Image (tube, rainbow, N blue to C red):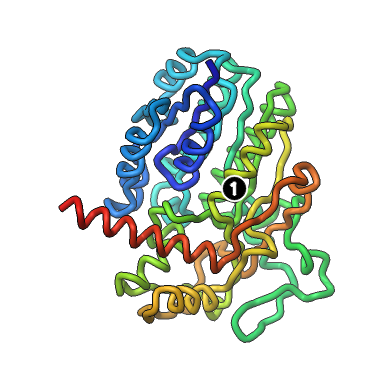
């Protein structure tokens, strides 16, 4: 029997991982205790998606377990042992705003939880592949030192800079910058995953994501900006943009493209390698551009306001350079641009709303 394990299995990337690998493995084990609802409120709950996975996949086994619970995690890993050949670690506290409210919880979830999983893998499934969804926040606010030029709807990097053509590569330093506490906890986890690959020889890969999104994203005010932006556009809920004249730029990778990257890593695993992953030059937008697209797709105006004070450590411009990943995995490419991604989010929100209506 072959077994894949996915943490954060009720979340956007976790659930898509379960669905994908559910068709490739004899069994998929999901770990998710709906911490998202605790962090961000009932509207961010992922229980609906966990229940849906259990209904759709006969070979799916769900565990309502906290990744910080060493005893419970060890028991799950011991049950499957060397049959466990893939671990996709997506569980996290994902908001740098929330992290400042409770740094201890943020660090123990992101750093300690990752350590618990790595130790369980080393003990029970040392031949497995470990894929970790890290974040571009490990670079802190270093991207804000880039020479930026203000255009009508966005900031851009000066064309003479090496990052202008393809985006930010893995050579960017992690040091001497303001990370946010969330960024610091993810740095710790990121380096741990690298070290378990390099020091212990385990098959580990770190994927430093830009914004990860898609139709199953339970977007909230503090996390998942494209999904929440579209949710606000459809519902009439007000939206606040913080700082940078609403011209800050993010690349956004559709969950389907990210899962395709996971699949590539699983089939040809590295050891302790780091890759920037995101929408890259193929899929990025500013806040102003995202608002305009949401309004166009939804056919209605968004009630948004501008707050001039930017969030601490917030990037003004971030686009991932994907060339290192594509050199290692030449069959992989971005398939979803921003418009297609937002259309999928729009359609997913409407479908979920209709399902809820029919269930009443």
Q: Give the image quarter of residue 141.
A: bottom right
Instruction: Give the side of residue 150 with respect to residue 8, left or right.
Output: right
Q: How many marks?
A: 1
- From the viewer's side, name the closer residue of 253 and 92: 253
**Residue assigned mark 1:** 258
In this picture, residue 131 sits left or right of residue 353: right
Q: Residue at x 52, y 50 (%)?
A: 181
Where does the image place residue 134, in percent across and percent down from the top left? 59, 45
Residue at screen point 68% across, 60% down: 280
**Looking at the picture, does residue 28 appear above or below residue 257?**
above
Seen as rendered, the residue at the extreme left is: 360
How far from the left and from the top, in percent, is residue 206? 65, 40
Look at 30% across and 74% down and name the residue there. Answer: 236
Q: Quadrant of residue 196?
A: top right
Q: Is residue 165 above or below residue 74?
A: below
* Residue 1, horizontal then vertical, whole percent: 53, 15
Which residue is painted at 34% across and 62% down in the image?
350
Q: Residues within 10 Å of mark 1 (few under 14, many from 20)?
A: many
Name the one closer to the observer, 77 or 213. Answer: 213
- Say what secondary structure mark 1 lies in: helix
- x%, y% of residue 192? 63, 33
């Amino acid at each position: 029997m072959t077994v894949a394990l996915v943490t954060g299995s009720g979340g956007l990337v976790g659930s898509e991982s379960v669905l994908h690998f559910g068709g490739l493995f004899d069994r998929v084990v999901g770990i998710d205790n709906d911490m998202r609802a605790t962090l961000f409120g009932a509207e961010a709950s992922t229980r609906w998606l966990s229940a849906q996975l259990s209904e759709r996949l006969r070979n799916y086994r769900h565990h309502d377990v906290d990744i910080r619970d060493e005893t419970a995690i060890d028991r799950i890993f011991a049950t499957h042992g060397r049959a466990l050949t893939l671990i996709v670690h997506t569980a996290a506290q994902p908001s740098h705003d929330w992290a400042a409210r409770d740094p201890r919880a943020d660090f123990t979830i992101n750093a300690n939880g990752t350590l618990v999983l790595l130790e369980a893998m080393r003990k029970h499934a040392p031949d497995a592949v470990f894929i970790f969804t890290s974040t571009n926040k490990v670079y802190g606010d270093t991207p804000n030192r880039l020479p930026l030029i203000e255009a009508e709807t966005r900031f851009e990097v000066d064309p003479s800079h090496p990052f202008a053509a393809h985006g930010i590569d893995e050579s960017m330093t992690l040091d001497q910058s303001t990370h946010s506490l969330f960024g610091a906890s993810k740095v710790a986890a990121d380096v741990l995953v690298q070290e378990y690959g390099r020091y212990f020889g385990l098959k580990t890969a770190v994927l430093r994501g830009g914004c990860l999104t898609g139709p199953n994203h339970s977007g909230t005010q503090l996390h998942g900006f494209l999904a929440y932006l579209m949710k606000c556009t459809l519902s009439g809920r007000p939206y606040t943009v913080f700082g940078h004249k609403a011209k800050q730029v993010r690349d956004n990778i559709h969950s389907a493209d990210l899962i395709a990257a996971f699949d590539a890593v699983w089939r040809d695993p590295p050891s302790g390698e780091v890759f920037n992953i995101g929408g890259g030059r193929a899929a990025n937008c500013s806040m102003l551009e995202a608002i305009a697209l949401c309004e166009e797709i939804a056919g209605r105006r968004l009630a948004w306001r501008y707050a001039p004070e930017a969030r601490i450590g917030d990037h003004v411009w971030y686009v991932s350079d994907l060339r290192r990943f594509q050199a290692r995995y030449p069959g992989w490419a971005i398939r979803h641009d921003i418009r297609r991604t937002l259309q999928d989010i729009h359609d997913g929100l409407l479908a979920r709303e209709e399902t809820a209506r029919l269930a009443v």
